[in-house]
Structure formats: C-alpha cells, structure tokens
Amino acid sequence: MAYGQTGTGKTYTLGRLDEEDDSNRGIMIRAVEDLLSGISLKDDCVTVSYLQLYMETVQDLLAPEKENIPIVDDPKMRDVLIPGASVVEIRDHKSFSELLKSGEANRAVANTKLNAESSRSHAILVINVRRLVSEAQEKSSPSDQGFLVPTIRRSKLVIVDLAGSERIDKSGVGGSSLDEAKSINLSLTALGKCINAIAEGNSHVPIRDSKLTRLLRDSFGGTARTSLVITIGPSPLHRGETSSTIMFGQRAMKVENMVRLKEEFDYKSLCRRLEREIDKLLVENERHTKAMIGAEDLQRTYEEMAANQNVKHQKELKELSSRLHAVNVDREKLQLQLRDSQIEVQLEKEKLGEEINRRLELEAENKDLNDKVLQLQNEVNEMQRELEQMRSGYQCKADKSHPVQKMTQNSNGQNRSKSTIVKLFEQVGLQNLLALLKSPDEDVQLQALRVIANLAADEAHQVKIMEGGGLSLLLDILRKPKNDSVCGIVAGAIANLAMRELNQVRLVEEGVIELLVIIAHKAQDPQTLRMVAGALANLCGNGEIQEKLRSEGGIKVLLKMGESQYLDVQAQVARALANIAKCESKRALQEYDARSLLIEEEALPWIVEKAKDCAEVVHRHIEMALVHLAQNECNAEVLVNSGAFTELVRISHECMKEDVRSLAYRVVCASPVLQAEFLRFSSTSPGE
C-alpha cells in the first residue's frame, strides 16, 4: 500500500499505465506481469477485482452501478470477502491494462489547491491466484502415491492506493469535497490507531472503526506479507505532514505478520482419477473372466470326447450289454433336456426379477419426484398467500402527475423460496427438472419453470442449463404459451440467462428477441412486462447485438412498454436505453462517428420527458442515458434542438451522484456545439 500526503505521488507510484514508456509504469502493471510470467494458463487461474472506498462505502470500479457493497468475514478461511464485487479473469497483460484503464475512469477525483486531480477515495486492487501444486511437491511417502490428493494453493495480492491526508486550510476544499476530506482523514486515523494498538501489543485492536481497517485486517498483524510505500513532498511548507507520514511508517515497521499458506485438497480430481482406475480394473477383470470361461469350455469338450471314446470301446467289448447301454443313453438325453429346461427357466426368472426390480425403482423414483414437486408447490402457494396478504395490507399510492403503480415483493419469501429451490435441485437433479417442463400437468410444469428461472440467476447453474438443453425447452414453451404467468416466468429465466455475456449471442441466434417482442405486444400482466423489459435491457448491454436488436423491433417495443403505468416496467426500459447509450459512448471514444440508435429510433423525446419529471428509480437511468448520448459529438446538435441540453446542464449542477454530475460537466465543456449553446443560453437567460 502507498501512504502519504495528497499530491506526493501515491497514484503515480502504484497505478501509472504509461503504455509508451515501460520504465514509467506503476507497481500494479509490473506485479501482474510478474504473476502471469510465473503461472500456467492451462492449470492456474488469475482473477481481478478493482474497488474504491468512497465516503465509507465500498464501490465497484469495474461495475459503477454496484454501490455500498457489503464486507463479509469468512471464519473458515480466516479471510475478508467482498461477495458483491465483480471478479474478472485475466490471461494476458493487455486485458489487465484495459481493465485498469476502465476502473481508473470511474474513480472519484477532484481539483484542490494541493492537487489538480486529487483522489477522493481509497483504491483497492485485489488479485486472486488459484494454482495447482505439482505432484512432485505433494509426495510425502511412497505409500501415498496411489491415492495422492491434488492440492490447490490460493493466494491474494492486495494493492492499496490510499487517498492522501490533507489539511482543510491548505487544500481549500468545501461542500461535498469537504465531506470527502473528512471521511478520508477519519479512515486514515482509524488505520493509524490499529497500527499503534498492534505495535504496542494491546489486547484490543479497533478493526471495526472503519471499513478501510476491516479490508486491510490481514495487512497488519495478520497472515500477509506487507510492503508499505511512504511518499512525502519536498516543500518546506508541509514539514508537519512530512514528519507525521514518516512517524506513521516507523510505527508500521514495528508490526509483525505471520505468513501462512492457504491450501486445500482437490477431491474432484482425485475422484476422476480413481474412476478411471476402476474402469481399467473392470476391463481387466472382464478379460480374465472370459479367459476362465474359455478354459472351462475346452475342458468340457475334452471330457465329452473321452466319454464318447469310452462308449465306443464298451460297445466293441460288450455287445451283450447294448440294451443296457441304450437305456443309459436315453436316460442321459432326458437329463440333458431337463437340465436345459431348468437353465432356460432360471434365465427367464432372472430376467423377470430384473424387470420387476427396474419397474419398482422407476415407480419409487417417480413417487419421490411427485412428492418433492408437491412439496415445492405447497411452499410456493404459501408464499403466494403471504404476498396477497401483504398486497392487501400495503397499497401503492399513485403520484398526482403520473399515476404509476409500483409492484412490491416479499424478500423473506424469496429467500426461503431460493433455499427450497436449491435444496430441491440438489435432490432431484437438473435433467429430471428439465424433463418436468414437458409434463402434461400444467401445475407441475409451472412449478418446474419457477425452479429453473430461479436457478438461472446463478452463473454456475446457467452453464448447466444451457448445456443440458434447457434453453430450447424454454423457447418451445414461449412459442406456445398457455397463459401470462407462464410467459412471465419464462421471460424471467431468459433475463437471468442474459446476464451472462457468453449466453447473449446464443440467445440472439435462437431468436429470443423476436419472441420477446411478440410477448411484449400481447402481454397485459405487469410482472410479464417487467421480465420482458429486463431481458431486453440485459441484451442491450452487449454492443455487438444492438443492430440486431434494432432490426427486429426491440427498441420500438421498449418505447411501447415505456408508456406503461407501472414503475418497475419504466425502470427496466430506462435501464435498457442507458445500456445502449453507454455502449455507443464507448465506441465514440474509438472514433465512432455515427448518430445514436436511440435518436434514429425516436427514443429521445421519451428520455427528455422522463428527465423532467419521473421517479428516482427511473430518473437515475435517464440521467446516465443523456450523459452517455452527449459523449458522441454527432448527437450534440440533436440534443440541443430537442431540449435535452437544458436537462444536461441541470444534471451537471444538480445530480446527486458526484461521478454522473462530474461526467456531465466534462461532456458539456468538451463538446464545441454544447459549449456554444451553453454560452448562448447564459447570455440570453442570465437569471437562470
């Protein structure tokens, strides 16, 4: 981590990219290059999360919409986890540079007297390495080689760019920047208290006084190997800050850490290895069995030949005993026939027994499936009754200017339903659940659809559903829906599958957009409309398929759903338009000189109307859409003529989110057309 006064080079030391001169690159780039050079991309895995601690809230720099992410302590691994943060796997230096560049663009900065681009948050880069330990390192004794359990070693590198400590009288900040400075100084003070307590050997260390100290719990007095970079300025005006910074470093040097390896056994790999060994032994056993049966047949043939020779000799020597011999022969034939009949009867009995056992097993399995589905149906019915009770107890109040109805949900019921669904999935299995989608019983099919839709929210289950043929079954049901409830549940499952970028291209290839457009035109149920709009919004986040979305009427139907009176439906439509504008703004940075699809599809009037007066859940997406549209210079003239410029100016001055307000201000200043309109507007309306 880097610690020091603001403006002394912490961000320059850690996060500088400098693609032109390798010698000026920061520690983040160099550390990742060193990691990638020492691992195997086939067996090992490197993932990255990039966060910032702004005003005591953890925010995701790779996904700015994720705010106030919770911090969770893992007592099993003795580690601090941030489960809501984005985790991106990197395989080369270029992908990490792009990732770091996008994260830095979302970081909170401000202009102060001490630094033109002062960091207003603590940036935290978390790099997790999962490495398979080679067998040569694992072997402990010759007796363990046959059943050696593979070992996975997990390591974590945390690079922290602490925001600089500053004195208010020197930095000259005010307003929100003053609150930011207070928050920064409080978190740095909490860090200093923890280091003092550990260095002095106190029994109590105030780890929970700040989220910064919770995140860095292992860095001081924990299980990490910690390096601290102290930065100071050469100006004699800041002697007090320089002295304080050096004293902080001296106290930190007294802290002792105990480095500990974190390893776990890979029992899945061992299981696969043992299965292959069992298959090999089974094949060898079958070969030996066939060889033994052949030897027995050969011995039986020899015995028969010897018996025939003996009979021939007896005939030649004892002609008088021919009648007795004939009787004996007849008796042997009857015994052989009886034996053959007994064998055939025994084989038939065995086949009949196997068939009976198989039918009994199938009947038992079918009964278990029906019981479990019935149990799930009862629990879902109970939750529906709870939802109806809540709806009857809490009625939505409509806004006087916009009669919007907001749908409510029971979070406790959802959590209980989710745990029940996961339990049922583990007991029944995916293939059995997919088979229930074809059930002629509408109630059974409906419950199976709800289970699949909830499982699709998990990325691991998404892969299994896509590989197991679940997408084809869902689309078949959507082509011939029985009612609006079925449409809403299937649309929700598709919306969950569309959250994963790898699934989006396949969804488009299977004709999902066309089906969603048809359902949106026919549906009247608000839940169904919200699920369809959510699925289209997730697809809008992929710039490669936006043209396909436009050609198949996806944007038109979004605008149609935007006229709905339901607040949740409007919010999903606004999110979809914001995703389209965001992808276009990224392409505009790459010299993309075409007008926006939203302008071509006449979506701008709806955006301007909602920007003037709408609820907060819709308004925040509308503001992002306007700011991203303004980043493309080709849209500037249309924004001025449509009245969107006035709303853009308002966003740059009144938006509650600092990053959106700052971005709107930079966009207005950077665009010649918007800047000229701003000067004209200021001269004609000085009071406003």
Image (cartoon, helix red, strand yellow):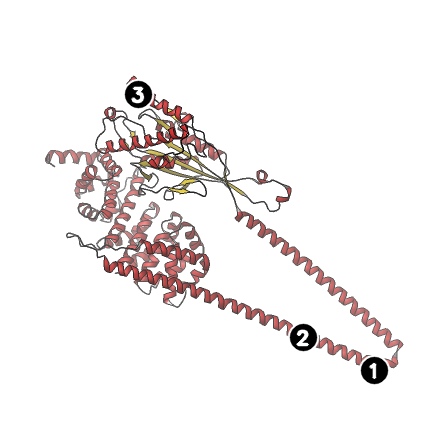
Residue at image coords 30%, 52%: 534
Q: What residue is disc 3 on?
A: 240
Label number found at residue 138? none
User: Between 126 and 264, which is closer to the camera in this rendering?
Assistant: 264
Determine if residue 18 is in view: no
Q: Nearer the viewer, mark 2 or mark 1?
A: 2
Neighbor class of circle 2 (other Cα within 10 Å; few <14, some 14-19, many 20+) is few
User: Is residue 467 toward the left or the right of residue 12 in the image?
Assistant: right
Disc 2 residue type (three-letter): Gln
Q: In the image, residue 556 lies at what x, y percent?
A: 25, 53
Tell me the kind of residue under disc 3: Gly
Q: x%, y% of residue 87?
A: 40, 42
Label 3: state its secondary structure.
helix
Mark-to-mark CA distance, 2 and 3: 105 Å
x then y, percent, for residue 456:
39, 54
> What amino acid is at disc 1?
Arg
Provide the residue designation for mark 2: 342
Proximity of marks 2 and 3: CB atoms separated by less than 8 Å: no
Q: Position of residue 137 (x, y in %)?
A: 57, 38
CA–CA distance in space, label 2 to label 1: 29 Å
Quadrant position of residue 404: bottom left
Label of residue 323 in the image:
1
